[in-house]
Amino acid sequence: YGDARDAVSLDSAGANAALSLWMGVQAACELRDPARVTALLESTATLRGRWVDAVRATALAAVAALAGDLGAEAGSAAFAPALAGWAALDLPLDHALATICACCCLPPGAVPAQDLAAATAYLTASGGTGLLERLVRTAGPSTEHPPGP
């Protein structure tokens, strides 16, 4: 989180700011810290674009899930538009990363099965072993690690 925050603070509208925002959001989700997510969103408010909008949607869902006392159903509903946005952009890696964020922020079993399945399939096919392990760890005991090739 600290490196992403520092990069954003150097130039909040620079070439690396959007990616730093996304990396920071992911780290803050792992830390389950809505204040850090909010701070990143505020410091990058001038960034624009469809990809940044998808990052913001994920971040806002994380804040809602972490800051509020949302149950599994409401938390899942908060993340649904964000996860659908990544799928609509046809960015499977980012969708998988957003799914991991959702797993970090929501109670076990609250992340939609279709998103878990899509993220698992993509990470398995692409050889994203570390991210796949992170997905399995954050999703909880109901997620099985698929067999390797």
Image (cartoon, helix red, strand yellow):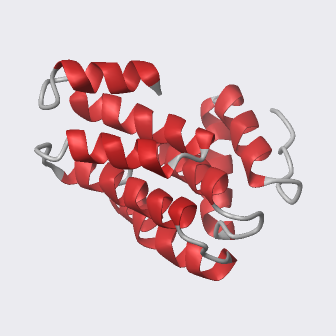
Task: Please name whichever residue, 122 or 133, is drawn nearer the observer in this view of the structure.
Answer: 133
> Which x, y percent locates residue 131?
65, 33
Query: Which residue, as the protein is rendered here, is positioned at the far bottom?
Result: 73
Quick check: 54 left or right of 43?
right
Can residue 91 be spotted in the picture? no
Is 145 on the left-hand or right-hand side of 70? right
Number of callouts: 0
Report the side of 47 relative to 40 (left or right).
Answer: left
Residue at image coords 33%, 43%: 39
Where residue 95 appears, x then y in whole percent? 48, 51
Locate residue 97 relative to residue 56 in the image: left or right: right
> At x 17% / y 30%, what residue is drawn?
12
Q: Residue 45: image x %, image y %?
A: 17, 47
Check the picture and name the quadrant holding the C terminus: top right
Residue at image coords 48%, 73% = 78
Toward the viewer: 77 or 44? 44
- Residue 52 spot, x, y in % from top left: 25, 47
| Towards the viewer: 21 or 6 | 6
Residue 112 can be seen in this image: yes
